[in-house]
């Protein structure tokens, strides 16, 4: 008799406090978690921030899981979290896209927050590397926001550019490279301007031997020459000179 009394009491409690449905599967195929009116195939709603947990119970160096995109039975993309180091279960977030033949990693954010595009081992805040182009056109960019951070082309031994919030811009060859020169070429053979590591400037030559070496004719209205700063004789080129 006592058991029936408990069941009856619980029934009355359920009637007086009706349970409000929070999950719903619509006839349209839309599924709602935390909502009775899902607007997409799956909607997760909450009064605060809503999260979806994807968990891997295996404690190994491997993907934890992710989201896969498919079209007509072919995987077209994937966003995946992967554990890449044992210490602290450090992870990387990988973005995979499909080429004409297979799924390939296009970008990743590593355990240090560095972003790599075309590389799985980014060495700076943004590291862009393309291996699909021919040698000499490949791009590797290293960007930063400090005054001593550079944008480097051709990897860590390539030429680089630095700008500052003070307004100056520095174009520099790399002392770690094998050819420390800065050149300007307008798309045809022959250097318009070449600056060597020693500070010599060459026009029309890649090997200036003086502070200014010109391989060709010079046209000027006047040239001032002086061995002493206070002594500046003026040489004027005229038709009768």
Image (spheres, helix red, strand yellow):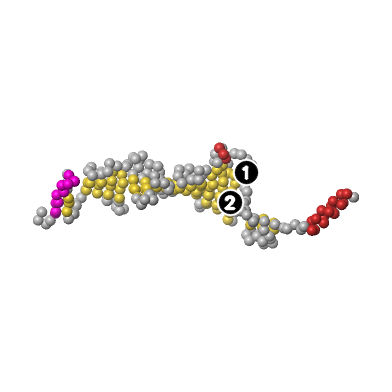
- At horizontal 40% and vertical 42% (from top left) the residue drawn is 156
Q: Report x, y in % for residue 170.
A: 34, 48
Q: Report x, y in % for residue 111.
A: 52, 43
Q: Residue 56 carries which label?
A: 1
* Range of magenta residues: 228-237
Q: Quadrant of residue 38?
A: bottom right
Tag 1: Cα neighbours inside 10 Å, few (<14), some, or many (≥20)?
Answer: few
Side of 221 where 65 appears, left or right: right
Q: In which quarter of the image is residue 34?
A: bottom right
- At horizontal 39% and vertical 46% (from top left) the residue drawn is 147
Q: Which mark is residue 68?
A: 2
* Residue most extreme to the right: 1
- At horizontal 67% and vertical 61% (from top left) the residue drawn is 37
- Specify the principal SS of the magenta part: loop
Side of 97 where 39 appears, left or right: right
| Position of the C terminus by quadrant | bottom left
Does residue 200 appear in this view? yes
SS label for mark 1: loop
Tally of marks: 2
SS label for mark 2: strand
């Amino acid at each position: 008799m006592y058991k029936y009394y408990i069941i009856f009491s619980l029934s009355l409690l359920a009637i007086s406090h009706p349970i409000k449905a929070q999950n719903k599967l619509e006839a349209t195929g839309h599924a709602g978690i935390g909502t009775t009116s899902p607007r997409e195939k799956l909607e997760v709603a909450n009064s605060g921030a809503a999260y979806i947990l994807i968990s891997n119970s295996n404690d190994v160096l491997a993907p934890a899981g992710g989201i896969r995109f498919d079209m007509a039975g072919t995987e077209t993309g994937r966003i995946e979290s992967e554990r890449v180091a044992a210490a602290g279960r450090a992870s990387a977030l990988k973005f995979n896209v499909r080429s004409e033949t297979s799924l390939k990693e296009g970008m990743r954010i590593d355990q240090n927050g560095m972003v790599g595009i075309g590389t799985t081992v980014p060495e700076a805040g943004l590291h862009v590397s393309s291996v699909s182009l021919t040698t000499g056109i490949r791009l590797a960019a290293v960007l930063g926001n400090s005054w001593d951070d550079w944008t480097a082309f051709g990897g860590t031994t390539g030429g680089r550019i630095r700008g500052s919030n003070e307004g100056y811009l520095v174009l520099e060859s790399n002392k770690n490279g094998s050819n420390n020169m800065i050149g300007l070429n307008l798309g045809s053979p022959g250097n318009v301007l070449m600056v060597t590591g020693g500070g010599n400037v060459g026009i029309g030559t890649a090997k200036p031997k003086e502070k200014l070496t010109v391989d060709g004719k010079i046209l000027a209205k006047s040239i001032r020459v002086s061995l002493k700063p206070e002594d500046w004789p003026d040489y004027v080129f005229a038709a009768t000179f």
